[in-house]
Image (tube, coloured by chain):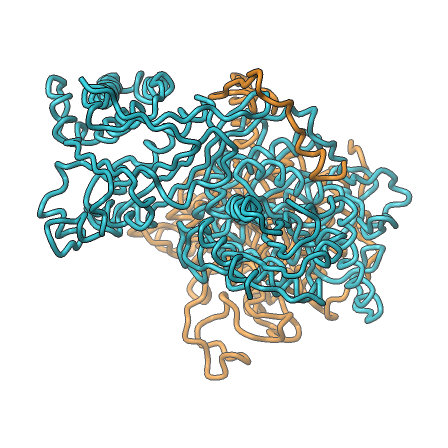
Amino acid sequence: MTKFNYTAKDFKSAAEVRWCPGCGDYAIMNAVQKTMADMDIAHKDFAVISGIGCSSRFPYYMSTYGFHTIHGRAAAIASGVKSANPDLTVWVITGDGDSLAIGGNHFIHLVRRNINLNLVLFNNKIYGLTKGQYSPTSDRGKITKTSPFGTIEDSFIPGQLVLGSRGTFFARAIDSNVKHTQEVLAESAKHEGTSVVEVLQNCVIFNDGIHDYVADPKFRAERQLFLMKGEPMIFGEQEDKGLILENGHLKVVKIGENGITREDILVHHPEEDNLGLQVALINMALPEFPVAMGVIRSVKAPIYDQEMKKQIETVQAKRRVTCMDELLQSGNTWTVDGENCSEPVKFFDNKCFV
Amino acid sequence: MKDAKVIELEEVAIRFSGDSGDGMQLTGTLFSDTSALFGNDISTFPDYPSEIRAPQGTVGGVSGFQVQFGKKKITTPGDLAHVLIAMNPAALKANAAFMNPGGTIIFDVDSFSEKNFAKAQFQTLDPFAELKLDDYFKIPVPITSLTKESLKDLELDNKSVLRCKNMFALGLICWMFERPLDYIERFIQNKFGKKSPLIAEANLKVLHDGYNYGMNMQHATPRFIVHPAPIEKGIYRNINGNLATAWGLLAAAEKSGLNLFIGSYPITPATDVLQALAERKDLGVKSFQAEDEIAGICTTIGAAFAGHLAVTSTSGPGFALKAEALGLSVMAELPIVVVNVQRGGPSTGLPTKTEQSDLLQTLYGRNGESPLVVVAASTPSDCFYYAFLAAKIALERMVPVVLLTDGFLGNGSEPWRVPSMSELPSITPRKATNPELFKPYNRDPETLAREWAVPGMEGFEHRIGGLEKNAAGGVSHDPENHHINTQIRAEKVAKVVDMIPELEVVGEAEGDLLVVGWGGTYGHMISSVRAMQNAGKKVSLAHFNYIKPLPKNTAEVFSKFKKIVVCELNLGQFASYLRDSVPGFHYYQVNKMKGLPFSVHELVENFEKILEA
């Protein structure tokens, strides 16, 4: 039984949504709103924080507390919100440009600290709001307005960055698969610590179809591997393909060929601290491999905001100073009370109107 | 035995000086604390290089600590030292210019070797003649060898033995100025007693040997008597500006009933504010050492959004990095306090030296029309009150407040009569109360402050951000709305004038010259103005703590004087601001850009010239 009986609709604000028609953001917002409704937490206890970019307009469209901040800083501002009040449910909405370029530093430190919030990274591999320049996730050689002859840089793979920053949760989804996105967001919401969900998102105006090759429903079974905790990593129309480890590397095999059986296929354990395998899953790319979707890593680790709270409680349990008057008079003080001494003058008698 | 030469003084300045590894800052601090406890009023000035350890024995590596104490109110650490303790020739060279003519120089004769003369780049083997210190009173003391001799029976390595040299000097100075040793003994016991009893024993032994050396050699050393100062009754402690700032913020948190959050990044000379607050988990402080300056202010803004008294601390270059986020707090109208402990600039500038050159950056250094409240503390101890007031203004007017202090205030110390919390004014944050009427940008008609609703409050859910909004909190690109809001944000800051006192004048309300200053130059300004007044000149002081908004009566005060001179440790930033904000006057300027405070002497000289002009 739920307390609030919320539906996704209850999380929509009155503000008019101003994304381009056909933008992948709509689908992601629906998934987030559905996830929030299912979390059964009061509106008042949500804070949705964003930076700058198309996706970062998100808080305005939510009926919760929201803060649309400045370029790249959502992770830092959200870190302050959650550290101040660990009881809040904090969501960070951000894009590949916002989080991985100008906000790269805050992003990695948020993940490293393991602050208990959910970060949804909309990855359309382009700068949308500034109208079509390449982003840190644009592929090498990408031709854009600021790279008319193709980029000469390698791109970030967001999951690698998360794991490289000692991330405890990383998952991947795609905007066109709302049901799966929502399942993944629900898992991220349950995770205690920083959960990063990369959602492959289509920008209809500046990078239309960038994820089509992965997303094409006709080939979804061949090109996407849906990871499930405790299940073998099997994919394909006939569910006849799977992953094995060979000489330390992942390899796609066909069940039934070369004596491979279902039992030979690797089983997915996101809860195990197996960075090597999880990075290998994150790196899988077409055409050699399917793209890994779902929760790739979800491990337990101390949570910053809880540790901060605990540390204060521990110190307070054996403290000597309990209030300012005690602090002011602690340590090296001395009393002046001589006959030729004057009465004290109160500072605020002349420095401020009380 | 002849009687010691006894000199009775009203006030005296001592400068401890040595290599940056010689422990001069500790020696100076211990002597200052002892003097304060003895009942003298004091003022201190630590002066140290930005390198952790510059090459030993070189002038660049000299670390100094000056303290002035006296039987009357002490407002500065003193222009020139009466007594210099020089642990090596480089220390002598670096400080010769800061000596009172005919002063006393105590030096470690063991270190006055040919090798060290070369390191300090003396041309001859007579550094005193080279520095024209011939007629100064010189006391050669074999500090190094006496320290070694003192500790020869303890099983200590040579390095640890040499580390005790500063205690010999301290003991000797304590004898010369009749300071009891018990406070220093307690300090040494607390610092080393439990962890390394041998080190504690060594330090104590050397301290006493230094003291006894003075007593035994009294025919050769003068002895000074400085009587206690008549001051207000109360409980006192010695406090530096950075600690006072941290405690003022803590006091504001308690008064306002809010938790204190500090998001910050270490930077000289502001780091101590963060450190002092990080230490106060017992009072519930949440301290967040951010990945950079930007994250420092951003976490602070997040904590303010979440309902905390939220603070960030920094110095010049760090303040520059915070500019964009500071603009966000102006736009979102969230109450944050930013402490800028100014240092020499531009860029990395003079990281350990004082300056007042961030004023224009503070007032104008953001994109757009971005007004905020600017407050400046004027002495180490009143950093407490201005930090408290900065928080009060921020929380009651929903506006970011920048508190300007500087390296001189932050590191300098003075005795402070400790207030009780009941003496401090109340702080009433503008927490929203009625969800039916709440709109994020509804304003109090008197103050123009909006209400503060924070996540977790039922019925007040709303969205804010850096984009221009209408009163209901919706994003608005309406030209009229932006024009009006720009005026409202400026007017809101202007209305803070209702909270602040009128400008006071020290001295007559009219006269020939009004000396104007702001912030950390107060001590030197008031000393120089009093010197002029004592000489019968019609000179008064108007010192500003509230810079934006300026006190209501500023123009009126200015109008009563024939001449006005604005003194600051920059090229005239406050003077330009006054020309713009309080027009119609001619502002003379006295400016200094040496990484050092003013000296009373140079101020007086300048004022006399202006009077004659």
Asked if one can make out residue A58 in the rendered structure from this viewpoint, the answer is no
Give the answer, above or below, for where B264 lies relative to B483: above
Asked if one can make out residue B209 in the rendered structure from this viewpoint, the answer is yes
In the image, residue A81 lies at what x, y percent?
63, 43
Give the answer, above or below, for where B462 lies relative to A331: below
In the image, residue B266 lies at what x, y percent?
45, 45
- Residue found at x 54% / y 50%: B295
- Seen in the image, is A32 located left or right of residue B320? right
- Seen in the image, is A244 located left or right of residue B91? right
Give the answer, above or below, for where B276 lies relative to B188: below
- Residue found at x 58% / y 53%: B517
- Seen in the image, is B338 located left or right of residue B224? right
In the image, residue B369 lies at what x, y percent?
70, 65
Location of the C terminus of chain A by quadrant is top right
- Residue found at x 25% / y 38%: B105
Total labels: the figure holds 0
The colour assigned to chain B within the rendered structure: cyan
Task: Spot the orange chain and give its letter.
Answer: A
Farthest-out residue, right: B436
Farthest-out residue, bottom: A149
- Residue found at x 79% / y 52%: B495
Foreground pick, B526 / B457: B526
Foreground pick, A215 / B401: B401
In the image, residue B11 lies at what x, y percent?
43, 33
- Seen in the image, is B609 located left or right of residue A199? left
Residue A82 picture quarter? top right
Foreground pick, B532 / B555: B532
Location of the N terminus of chain A by quadrant is top right
Foreground pick, A55 / B359: B359
Farthest-out residue, front: B536
